[in-house]
Amino acid sequence: MGKKATKKMKASKGAVATLPKKKCCEDTPKCRRCPLRMLKEGTLPEGYTVHRRRLVTTAELERTRKKSKKKLAA
């Protein structure tokens, strides 16, 4: 699948949205699946966010924040 094939898939109505990578590769020209680029453009799927250049679910992020608050309180 070259670049031409992916462009055709995006243009069709029944195409599946491209999923972001799990981790940003930190290249200067951002790739199409970069989670940072997708977050900036607003194309990141619902329920996902980026934390420290890694793709995480919003529920996962909330769990880690609650744990850190408990550690600070103790």
Image (cartoon, rainbow, N blue to C red):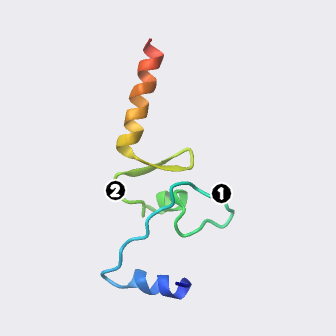
Q: Which mark is residue 41?
A: none
Query: Image height check: is 39 above or below 68?
Result: below
Residue found at the far front of this picture: 1
Question: How many numbered circles does the render carry?
Answer: 2
Q: Is residue 24 left or right of residue 11?
A: right
Report helix, strand or loop for mark 1.
loop
Residue 7 position within the rendered picture, expressed as x and y whole percent measured from the top left: 48, 84
Residue for point 47% across, 17% down: 72
**Mark 1, residues whose alpha carbon is within 10 Å: few (<14), some, or many (≥20)?**
few
Q: Is residue 67 left or right of residue 35?
A: left
Residue identifier under label 2: 46
User: Type of residue at label 2?
Assistant: Glu
Cα gap from disc 1 to disc 2, whole angstroms: 23 Å
Residue 45 position within the rendered picture, expressed as x and y whole percent measured from the top left: 37, 60
Residues at circles 1 and 2 in contact by the CB criterion of under 8 Å: no
Query: Image height check: is 63 above or below 29?
Result: above
Q: Is residue 4 left or right of residue 28?
A: left
- Specify the quadrant that holds the C terminus: top left
**Mark 2, residues whose alpha carbon is within 10 Å: few (<14), some, or many (≥20)?**
few
Report helix, strand or loop for mark 2.
loop
Residue 44 position within the rendered picture, expressed as x and y whole percent measured from the top left: 42, 60
User: Type of residue at label 1?
Assistant: Glu
Question: Which of the two labelled residues, at mark 1 and mark 2, occupies the earlier sequence position?
Answer: 1
Residue for point 61% across, 65% down: 30
Residue for point 39% across, 28% down: 66
Query: Image height check: is 16 above or below 63?
Result: below
Residue for point 31% across, 82% down: 13
Residue found at the far right of this picture: 28
Residue identifier under label 1: 26
Closer to the camera in the image, 2 or 46: 2
